[in-house]
Each structure stands twice: as C-alpha cells, then as structure tokens.
Amino acid sequence: MTSTLLLRTVRRTFIAGTAALLVGTAAIPSFVTPTFANDGPASVADLAAGLLGAVVNISTSQTVKGTEGPGAVPMPQLPEGSPFQDFFDDFFKNRGGGKDNSAQKVQSLGSGFVIDAEQGIVVTNNHVIADADDIEVNFSDGVTLKATLVGTDTKTDVAVLKVDPKGHKLTAVKFGDSTKMRVGDWVMAVGNPFGLGGTVTVGIVSARNRDINSGPYDDFIQTDAAINRGNSGGPLFNSAGEVIGINTAIISPSGGSIGIGFSIPSQLASGVVDQLRQYGETRRGWLGVRIQPVTADIAESLGMTTAKGALVAGVIKGGPVDNGTIQAGDVIIKFDGKDIHEMRDLPRVVAESPVGKAVDVLIVRKGVEQTVKVTLGRLEDGEKLASGEPGNTNQDKGGDKAPAVSTASVLGMTVGELNDETRKKFSIAADVSGVVITDVAKDSAAAERGIQPGEVITEIAQESVATPKDVMDRIGALKEQGRKNALLMLASKTGELRFVTIRMD
C-alpha cells in the first residue's frame, strides 16, 4: 500500500495569482469573540476541545509479497559458489526481497470520525482502508479498537467502519448542511497528517462545486485549511461544530499542503453513509441514458437560446426509459424539480434519488419544452446492462425510401448507402441504420470534429436520414433556414451514439 492511499494528491502545474480576502463584521462566526487577529479568528480552542474526542486515527495493515512491498529490491544474481551467497540470502529473504517472495506487512495511516456513539459507527475515506487486512481505530486518549468494515463506495470514496461501543466511551459528531456554506465561511479541519494525530487547522471555504475528475459525482468543497497526507477521511467542521465535509484530496506538486484541499460535501456523503449502514452497499437511482454536454453550437442547432442541460446521446436498452419516454436528442434541463445547468449535474441528482421513485423530468425535444414522468431503476443493477448494450435511438428506420444517389459529398465528408457491402467493409453492426461516412477530407470541418470513416449518420437536426440524398436535402434545408451549424447524431460501428455539430459556412 503506497503513501498515495493516505491522501489522494492531484498533481497539476499552476500559475500563481494574487488574491485578497475582505472580512467584514457579518463574516464573524458564532464561536469567535469580536476580536480578530491579523488573518483569522482569535481562537477556536473551545470549538476544538469539544470535537477532538470524536476524530480518530485509522491505521491499516496489508500483507503483500516481499517483491511487491515499497522499496523492495530484487536479490542480485551472484556467480555460483560466490562467498557472498549466504550473506545475500539472509539479507534479502529477511526483507521480503528474495526469490521466495516472503510476505511482509505494509502499514498506512488516515483519519476518520465517529457519527454514532451507541452503534460505534466511524466514517472515513474508502482509499484509506482499501485492500486492508486489518483496520484499527485509534482514539485521542490512546485507546485502540479493532474495526470491521460495514461498506464502501468507490464512486464517492466513502467507507463506513464499526467498532465495539462497549470497548470505549465514544463521542460522536453529526453531519451539517453543506449547501448552506458560502465562499469565505470559516471551517476547521481535524485529522492525522503525517501520523501526527489530533491536528487542528483553520481556513475558509475557498470555492464550491469543484470537479477534479476523480469520480462521476465530483462536487467538492475547496478549502485553504491545511490538509496533508494522513488527513484523508477526517472531518471538515463548520462554526457550529457540524461535519460539512470529508477531507479527501489535495492539489500539491510536492505532496504537502499548498492551501488547496478538497472535501466531499456532507450533502453527498451523508446519503451514502446512510445507505452503507442500512444495506452494506449503495442503492442509487438510475435513468438509463447516455449523456453529453450541451455546447453553444449544439444549443444553437437545437433552437435553444442558452447552452444548458444534459443532451441524451442514447437510451440503454432495457432501462427505465426504454419505452420512448426519453429519446436520443432530448435535452434534460430539470430533474425532479432540480435545475440541470450542465451535464455533470444530472448523474448526481439522479443517483441521490430513491430507486423506484416516479419523478418529473423537463426536457427540450425539437425546440419544445415538455415534462415527462419516469420511474427510476437501480444504478447498480443497470451498470452491466449499460456497458454491454448499444444505445436505442428510438428513431424511424426510414427503410422504404429509394436512394436517388449512391454517394454524396457534403461538409467535407463522403457519404454512401449503408448496405451489405459497406457494413462488411467497416464492420458495422446489423442493428445500426443510417448513412455511412466513407471518407473525411483532411482539414475539413468534419475532420476537426473527429469524425471518422465508418461512422454512421443517423439523424441531422433531429430528423432521420437513410440515404445520401436525405443528407444533402437536410443540409440544404438548414442552410435555407439560415443555420450556421448542422447537428449530426452519429453511431459508431457498434451502435454507440454521440452528437456533433459541423459548421456549414
């Protein structure tokens, strides 16, 4: 187990800027007297004293083969009969580096906090305890208890542990409402950085809704409270002593704090913790669609005034909306009363919804807003289905039209009939229909969008196409309407769908 398990480090290169913090009297938190030091509250001693007992250190051990341990060096090959043979045998075998792959214990440290004293429930990060053989919880007064794993969620990096509440008098903290936190609010982090237990640091909420590409539900709180390796799984408190975040990642070129840390918001974490406690696993809502961002070009092509929402690129066969309720090309702009500003908003709000719940979904279909009602499935049940099935376009196959031309050149592409010959040439699945792209001109608008020969045009501006003539007619009609871009729905050789806009100037 490497040190990166103690705190995930996002390594990036930054150009430092200059920032100024303006603090007014309205920003004074309730736990601070109206006296400020030069750059922070005068004291958080009273707040910290009441919380330290609930914050714990998590230590884990994992048995690995000697050659897999950190810093393990393979035994050198010596000439037969070398006088150093016995020495190297003893040296390397004792350190797990010999040919016998002797096992050794690897230790790691992290943080956590008690949320239920009666049941002995402790929350931490999944990566703190991942692959561990033994887990111990160390309390601030020196007591150590063995812990068992209740459940984990890799998507949000949350884990729930249980200790025997009879083995030690426990102090618990509770989750607060992270949605009420504002940029500039004071926060306090407590944890086990570099193995130094019971460490308190203070800072502010630097930003909200951060996406650091660590998982499908990224919505991190950014803070400048010092967070280092070993702080993983520790709590981020608000001024009322409530947990509004779980410290989980840092941005650092060196591995130490540079004042950019990230916490899982309690709004997301608390629901996951409840499910892990109740079921030992997560049970997330599932809509059964593939989505992509709505760019400015796509919005213009769909007749939308602003680029917002999540564009449905495909519908999972056998999923909750495989009945035509939602179709490829729809833009979801509101789900169960919650606005969908951008694509990444939708997976999170759907996942937070109960399985089996009937919800209203506001969509834009062919430029017209309408509300449809869907009943959610369970994400965990649908993941295998989603990964193995092509998107269902729910479109008119358009098979009876007689082609007027066999090929056509349009927008830097050469398109042709999708028949037995072209299916075989490009290995296109039998259930894919439309017009095949046989060639893409270099430096064309189509090439700029990454369009490749073998892809199939199934729709243009949300109208099905079945022949090269259909393609030319649709492009011609869009130009007559004064459109600057053409919205194409493309199918891969296996039927995976995506939307692309191409300039028509």
Image: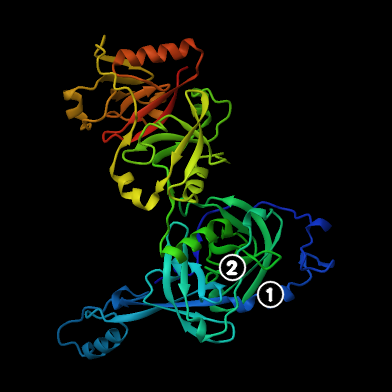
Residue sitting at x 47%, y 58%: 156
Vertical comparison of 80 with 159: above or below: below
- Please tell me the numbered disc located at residue 169: none
Q: Is residue 206 left or right of residue 32?
A: left
Amino acid type, mark 2: Pro
* Quadrant holding the N terminus: bottom left
Q: Residue 275 or 365: which is nearer the viewer? A: 275
- Find the distance from the CA under tag 1 to the CA under tag 2: 12 Å
Q: Residue 405 or 117: which is nearer the viewer? A: 117
Where disc 2 sits, the SS reads: strand
Amino acid type, mark 1: Ala
Residue sitting at x 67%, y 54%: 180
Residue sitting at x 38%, y 33%: 498
Q: Residue 22 or 338: which is nearer the viewer? A: 338
**What crowding class fits label 2: few (fewer than 14 Cα within 10 Å), some (14-19), or many (20 or more)?**
many
Residue 312 appears at what percent x and percent y?
Answer: 43, 34
**Marks 1 and 2 in Cβ contact (< 8 Å):** no
Vertical comparison of 481 with 85: above or below: above
Residue 23 in sight = yes
Vertical comparison of 224 with 166: above or below: above
Residue 441 appears at what percent x and percent y?
Answer: 34, 23
According to the image, label 1 marks what residue?
A: 48
According to the image, label 2 marks what residue?
A: 235
Residue sitting at x 26%, y 15%: 407
Residue extending furthest left?
80
Q: Quadrant of residue 223?
A: bottom right
Q: Is residue 40 left or right of residue 330?
A: right
Residue 4 in sight = no
**What crowding class fits label 1: few (fewer than 14 Cα within 10 Å), some (14-19), or many (20 or more)?**
some
